Image: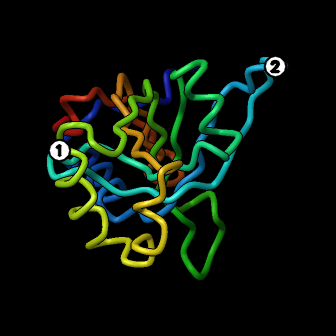
Amino acid sequence: MPDLIRPTDDDARQLARDLLDSARYGALAVLEPDSGQPLVSRVAVGTSPQGQPVSLVSDLAHHTRALQKNPACSLLVGEPGDKGDPLTHPRLTLQAQARFLGHGDRGHAELAAHYLRDHPKAKLYIGFADFSFVLFDVSGAFLNGGFGRAFTLTPDDLRL
């Protein structure tokens, strides 16, 4: 079978960056600590001032507890459009390690102000003691740019 992954080019890099920058939510995949089974949750997604993917999570959420036990995760961003086959729309899968940034940690206030620009409704709960940020330290990415347009990307391709 032929290799269906295309060489990564500037158009693929730009599409991946656009998907990440425009994402407001995504599907977060973790490993459930008790069973070791995969668990997927919808989470709010944004980027740090440096462009790194980030989410605001509660300690009460099952996916947060899973990340605290095992920070390996995957994050899918990119939504289908209003028309057509959902599989023809671009999406980006990130492989990452989760890193928590809590209240009082260096950089938290700056990140909170930045995050609230794109997620103003988070103002209702961003100050709750059980909420913290998760920064996703990306190790690799897979871009499906639509039918027949698959690419493998590195953190450098995403300018991280």
The relative height of residue 22 versus residue 32 in the rendered view (above or below) is: below
Location of mark 1 (residue):
10
Q: Is residue 118 above or below residue 17?
A: below
Percent x, y of residue 123: 39, 73
- Position of 93 with respect to 113 (left or right) is right
- Give the residue type that dot 2 points to: Asp
| Residue 99 position (above or below residue 11) | above
- 8 and 68: which is toward the camera: 68
Secondary structure state at the residue bearing disc 1: helix
Q: Is residue 66 left or right of residue 3?
A: right
Mark 1 vs mark 2, CA separation in Å? 42 Å
Q: Mark 1 or mark 2: which is in front?
A: 2
**Front in this rendered view, residue 135 or 152:** 135
Which percent across, then down, holds residue 159?
16, 38
In the rendered image, the vertical position of residue 146 relative to residue 134, given as above or below:
below
* Residue placed furthest toward the right: 35
Q: Secondary structure under badge 2?
A: loop
How did the renderer colour the structure?
rainbow
Q: Residue at x 69, y 25 (%)?
A: 31
Q: Tell me which residue sits at (15%, 46%) in the image.
A: 50
- Residue 87 figure quarter: bottom right
**Where is mark 2, residue-wise?**
34
Give 30 or 125, whichever is nearer the viewer: 125
Question: Which badge, 1 or 2, is on the more N-terminal residue?
Answer: 1
Q: Quadrant of the N terminus?
A: top right
